[in-house]
Image (spheres, rainbow, N blue to C red):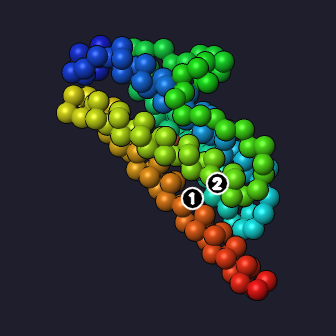
């Protein structure tokens, strides 16, 4: 644990560690949501979207690493048992029972929007008080915003494809 790291954080460190552990749980669930969804996915544009979803998955794992390092630096204990992931996470894990590409993307989109809110809240909590955590949180927030945008673009393209197919039928 970094004693000075704790001293200079001008906020409730115990609460911050709790919030970071919640974010850590969410990142693991987001990682699995992308990772399993990419493999099950069926439908148009699969070959383009699948590698991108796997890239998002890798980035979620990178976020988990940034968070876990900060928790340890602050003298906290990261979640040690995966049983706690669902318990800590405020963002839902949605079981991908329907492999249609649009359903998979919508599940991931809901996860991204929840993550954006999580890091927005963490940014507000740490802004001007704990510069190090703030910087980490902003880095992750920017990635989550990019993820949301990627998914929205694919959904727009899928919608356009569906509309074009409908026109051909008429
Ligand atoms: Fe993430
Ligand atoms: Fe994300």
Instruction: Write down the residue under mark 2.
Output: 105
Residue at image point 62% right, 40% down: 31
- Give above or below for 14 relative to 52: above
Quadrant into which the N terminus falls? top left
Can residue 4 be seen from the camera position used here? Answer: no
Could you tell whether 68 is left or right of 82 in the image?
Answer: left
Crowding at mark 2 (Cα within 10 Å: few <14, some 14-19, many 20+) = many
| Label 1 packing within 10 angstroms: few (<14), some (14-19), many (20+) | many
Q: CA distance from mark 2 to mark 1?
A: 6 Å
* Residue 35, position as x, y percentages in the image: 70, 44
- Which element carries disc 2, helix, strand or loop? helix
Q: For this rendering, which residue is in front, 33 or 100?
A: 100
Give the mark nearest the N terminus, 2 or 1. Answer: 2
Residue 44: name its quadrant. bottom right
| Picture coordinates of residue 132, whole percent (x, y) | 30, 32
Q: Position of residue 66 (x, y in %)?
A: 46, 34
Q: Is residue 147 above or below residue 30?
A: below
Q: Are marks 2 and 1 in contact (CB under 8 Å)?
A: yes
Residue 77 visible? The answer is: yes
Please tell me whether residue 135 is drawn above or below residue 142 in the rendered image: above
Name the one closer to the observer, 137 or 101: 101
Q: Most extreme residue toward the front, as rendered?
A: 170
**Residue identified by numbered label 1:** 151
Taking the spot 56% from the left edge, 50% from the top edge, the residue there is: 109
Q: Quadrant of residue 43?
A: bottom right
């Amino acid at each position: 644990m970094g004693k000075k790291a704790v001293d200079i954080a001008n906020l409730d460190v115990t609460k911050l560690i709790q919030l970071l552990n919640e974010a850590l749980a969410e990142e693991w669930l987001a990682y699995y949501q992308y990772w399993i969804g990419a493999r099950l996915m069926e439908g148009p544009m699969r070959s383009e979207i699948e590698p991108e979803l796997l890239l998002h998955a890798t980035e979620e794992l990178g976020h988990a690493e940034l968070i876990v390092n900060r928790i340890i630096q602050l003298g906290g204990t990261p979640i040690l048992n995966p049983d706690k992931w669902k318990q800590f996470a405020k963002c839902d894990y949605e079981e991908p029972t329907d492999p249609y590409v649009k359903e998979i993307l919508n599940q991931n989109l809901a996860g991204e929007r929840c993550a954006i809110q999580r890091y927005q809240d963490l940014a507000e909590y740490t802004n001007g008080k704990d510069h190090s955590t703030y910087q980490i949180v902003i880095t992750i927030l920017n990635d989550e915003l990019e993820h949301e945008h990627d998914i929205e673009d694919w959904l727009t393209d899928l919608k356009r494809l569906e509309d074009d197919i409908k026109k051909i039928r008429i």
